[in-house]
Image: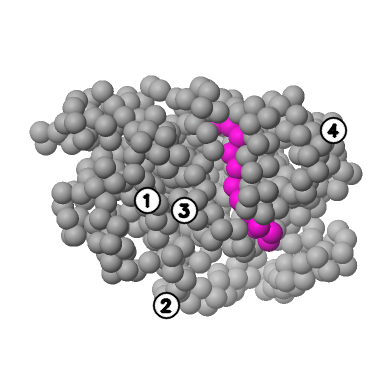
Amino acid sequence: MRTLLLNPAFRAPKQAGFGLSFPLGLAYLATALKNAGHDVIGLDAAIEAPPTTSSDGTTHYGLTENQLRNRIIKIKPDLVGISCFFSSRFPAVLKSAQVIKNIDRAIPIIVGGAHPSIMPERVCANQAIDFAMIGESERSFPDFINVHEQGGDLRKIDGLAFKQDGKIIINAKTRYENNLEELSFPDWDTFGLEKYLNLKKDRWGLGYGRYAPVITSRSCPYNCNFCSVHKVMGSKYRVRSAAHVFREIELLATRYGVNEVSFEDDNLTYDKTRFIEICKRIIESGIKIKWHTPNGVHVGSLDHEMIGWAKKAGCDSLNLAIESGDEYMRNKVIKKGISTKKIYDVTRFCRKAGIKVNAYFVIGMPGETDESIDNTRKLIRDLHFENISIFSATPIPGTRLYEECLAKGYIKPDAFDTEFISEQATIFTQPVIETPHFDKYKTRKWAHRLANAYNISLLMNRPILRLKQNPRMIVAAAAKVFLFLILGENRSLKVIDYIRRIKNK
């Protein structure tokens, strides 16, 4: 059976924050299917044509529907698996599925990724989609193909959602691979890794070399109230050995000339011994790479020794998942388990080692007050991060945050569908929660204040050096601070929003 693994073309707001990247999950599936003896073709439709921007401010990445149709006719797949990692990409998945069904309704379509893992029934309810796969699928997808070919019992397939006799059947997801090394490495060649190596990114300074993603573990041992990782990767934290991780890095460096690695783990640094061993192997090999942690690391897992080894092994920056500058919000509400002192200490250790420090913050949680969010502002002001991201609390179905917000009436029952399953969605940045203390507008205003605190910190801390390193960032920061001081908070926010709309057209 010829299986096409498709990463769909998509449309998104220019400021959505998620661009093009190598489809790592599909590449792991390609390895699994080939090892099981299946014929596999990969198509990342998002990278196969230059992006185009529309008058509504959205950018289309990749093939048009007609171009996709021509590719499908040429490939002649017997089965198509479509990736849907972000919920905002689901409309693109549906469009691609409909293109395929218009060619031949008999071609089975199965959708996998984070979105169908969280909402399998809703995904499978669409006429153009035949099946949905929950969670990691390196074992269950080959099983599905075998059973489907033989006309066997689909109820035996772990984590499969499908239609039968007018009903949607959802098989429980119970199997997760404990030995990640048995999955081998992702199939970089099926999607043509070379096409991605020189993609320029403007986030965290990431992707300015020959850049490739690597994931060394799955799931996370922590349990933050907003995080959906356990719905996708299961609750058990699993890792690859340092030796296995290094072999992948070595192959990427020697075979493909990769000199920059993005560790895509949800928690790379949880196991101190393993992390230091990875660093030591990189150092001893003499391979010169620069690496980053774009998904963030848990501040509580870091110490002075680990940071020292990280720098020697090529760490350029660490993204600290701080979430809040207020200890009550951070530990009692979010359940992060990090003291404010630890945040200051780790930031100081990184600066001393010469590692850039970026930070993630989440605002607008239930329980947030002006006082708690002002503590976040003070922390941003004091620690002079190289970069920050401010996210609005996003209640993803299946998380504790979602259940609390739904029970207390802080979100509408259809909030996730209406706010995030849309090509216009700027997921994680648009407020959706309304509490007695914080409405959506107030959350936006505080996001503006936090951004202003960050801009002031940029201008107050080593401005000449920063101007040399990133002149555009410093000039933009100065302009925003000027607007804030001259126009005041409300009018400057309106001006910045207007400028963003103009830029996106």
The answer to whether 89 is drawn above or below residue 241 in the figure is: below
Q: Depth-wise, is mark 1 or mark 4 nearer the camera?
A: 1
Q: Amino acid at mark 1?
A: Ile
Q: Amino acid at mark 3?
A: Phe
Give whichever of discs 3 and 1 has the lower sequence position: 1
- Residue that carries the numbered disc 1 in the rendered image: 41
Mark carried by residue 489: none
Q: Helix, strand, or loop for circle 1?
A: strand
- How many numbered discs, if any? 4
Residue 211 lies in the magenta-colored region? yes
Q: Return the x and y of residue 231 as percentages of the image width and height.
A: 44, 32
Q: Return the x and y of residue 246 as percentages of the image width and height.
A: 68, 36
Q: Depth-wise, is mark 3 or mark 4 nearer the camera?
A: 3
Residue at x 55% of width, y 71% of height = 500
Residue at x 28% of width, y 69% of height = 66
Residue range highlighted in magenta: 206-220
Q: Disc 3 to disc 4, how far (Cα)?
A: 39 Å
- Residue that carries the numbered disc 2 in the rendered image: 55
Give neighbour class at mark 4: few <14, some 14-19, many 20+ (Cα, 10 Å). Answer: some
- Residue that carries the numbered disc 3 in the rendered image: 191
Residue at x 80% of width, y 65% of height = 469
Task: Please state which of residues 29 and 297 is positioned toward the viewer in this rendering.
Answer: 29
- Residue that carries the numbered disc 4 in the rendered image: 304
Report if residue 422 is visible in the image: no
Task: Please state which of residues 163 and 504 is positioned toward the viewer in this rendering.
Answer: 163
Q: Helix, strand, or loop for circle 4?
A: helix
Q: Helix, strand, or loop for circle 3?
A: loop
Residue 292 lies in the magenta-colored region? no
